[in-house]
Structure formats: structure tokens, C-alpha cells
Amino acid sequence: MKTTAELKNNLILKIQNSKDIDFLKALQAFFDASEESTYKLTDEQENALNESREEIKRGDFVSNDEVMSKTKEWLKNR
């Protein structure tokens, strides 16, 4: 397995030696896209996330185990 440094050096050499402008443009676009935020949230989504974080801090939530237990109990009684 190559180290990070070896991979970087190998990529640098390939880029330096490449004469394929389309490949280099595609590579540039890839790097540009990877530097951008993966998700762009709306204000409403940001607010909902912040509200959820506050609820968690207050302990105002139900654990997954509790939900599964209650669901199984509910299914038994149907």
C-alpha cells in the first residue's frame, strides 16, 4: 500500500506530464467541487438542525432502543 506522500508525488508527476487539456480541466473541476461544501442547506433546514441540536442538549429525545421497544410492543398488540 502506498503512503499518502507517495500517492501525492505520483499524482503530481502525472499532472505535470499530462498534455491532455480535457483531462486537466476535468481534474480541476473535480478539485474545485471537492473544496465546496457538500450540502447547501436552506435557512429553514439550518433552523431545523439547530432546533434539533438544542433538543438533544436538553435531553428532549427518545433513544432508538426505546423507539424499537415501543414499536415491537405496539406490533404485538395489533
Image (cartoon, grey):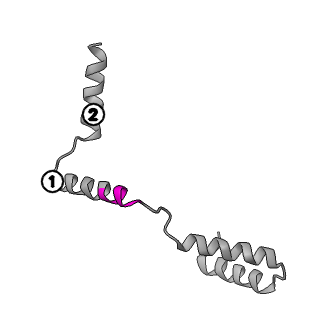
* Above/below status of 64 relative to 41: above
* Above/below status of 26 relative to 46: below
* Identity of the residue drawn at 25% across and 55% down: 51
Residue 27 in percent (x, y) is at 70, 74
First along the sequence among labels 1 and 2: 1
Q: Nearer the viewer, residue 14 or 60?
A: 60
Give the left or right position of residue 12, taking residue 67 as reference.
right
- Looking at the rendering, the stretch of residues picked out in magenta corresponds to 42-47
Q: CA–CA distance between discs 1 and 2?
A: 19 Å
As helix, strand or loop, the secondary structure at mark 1 comes to: helix
* Identity of the residue drawn at 66% across and 76% down: 7
* Identity of the residue drawn at 77% across and 80% down: 14
Q: Nearer the viewer, mark 1 or mark 2?
A: 1
**Image quadrant occupied by the N terminus:** bottom right
Give the left or right position of residue 43, taking residue 51 as reference.
right
Residue 57 in percent (x, y) is at 19, 56
**Residue 62 magenta:** no
Counting the numbered discs, the total is 2
User: Extreme front residue here?
Assistant: 43
Q: Which residue is mark 2?
A: 67
Q: Residues within 10 Å of mark 1 (few under 14, many from 20)?
A: few
Residue 63 in percent (x, y) is at 25, 41
**Residue 45 magenta:** yes
Residue 32 in percent (x, y) is at 60, 75
Q: Which mark is residue 58?
A: 1
Check if mark 1's residue and mark 2's residue have beta carbons within 8 Å.
no
As helix, strand or loop, the secondary structure at mark 2 comes to: helix
Kind of residue indicated by mark 1:
Arg
Kind of residue indicated by mark 2:
Val
* Above/below status of 28 relative to 57: below
Give the left or right position of residue 56, taking residue 8 as reference.
left
Toward which corner of the image does residue 6 lie, by quadrant? bottom right
